[in-house]
Image: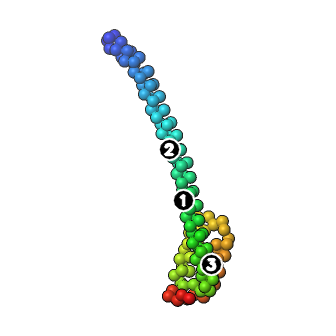
Amino acid sequence: MPMDNDIIAQLSAALVPLLGAVCGYLAGKLRAAAKRAKAQDAADQKQQAALVDGVKSLLRGQIIDDGLTYLEEGAIPPFALETMEHQNDAYVRLGDGDKSVNDIVDRCRRLPIRSGHDHE
């Protein structure tokens, strides 16, 4: 079957470059997708860091503001102390870099507990 061999040889000669071109195209697509994924990961990490910094800043501000208010009043309601402690726990887990926040919370823990309805 020499004719069959000729057809197979011709098909092989035509398909090998085509197959190489398809493989090259797919490899290029994979490299481009990997590059986009890497860029997206970097953007996601920057966004995550910004969110952590923002939440940490909000927690810090709230703890300091509330803490100084209660320290000035000389007493703290139990719900406020519990809230402040939860905020401080989250602040610490996010990477506490400010010892003054911990100091304010510790000072508030030593305040007398007052009724949540008492306001002077």
What is the x, y in percent for residue 85?
57, 76
Q: Which residue is mark 1?
A: 51
Mark 3 or mark 1: name the one nearer the start of the chain.
1
Q: Residues within 10 Å of mark 1 (few under 14, many from 20)?
A: few
Q: Which mark is residue 37?
A: 2
Measured in 3D between alpha carbons, the distance from the residue under mark 1 to the one under mark 2, in whole angstroms, is 21 Å
Q: Amino acid at mark 3?
A: Leu
Residue that appears at 44% across and 21% down: 17
Q: Which residue is mark 3?
A: 68
Query: Disc 2 vs disc 3: which is toward the camera?
Result: 3
Residue that appears at 39% across and 18% down: 14
What is the x, y in percent for residue 30?
47, 36
Residue that appears at 46% across and 35% down: 29
Taking the image as drawn, is residue 89 in sight?
no
Residue that appears at 34% across and 10% down: 2
Q: Amino acid at mark 2?
A: Ala
Left or right: 97 in relation to 62: right
Mark 2 or mark 3: name the one nearer the start of the chain.
2
- What is the tally of numbered marks visible in this picture? 3
What is the x, y in percent for residue 66?
58, 77
Measured in 3D between alpha carbons, the distance from the residue under mark 3 to the one under mark 1, in whole angstroms, is 26 Å
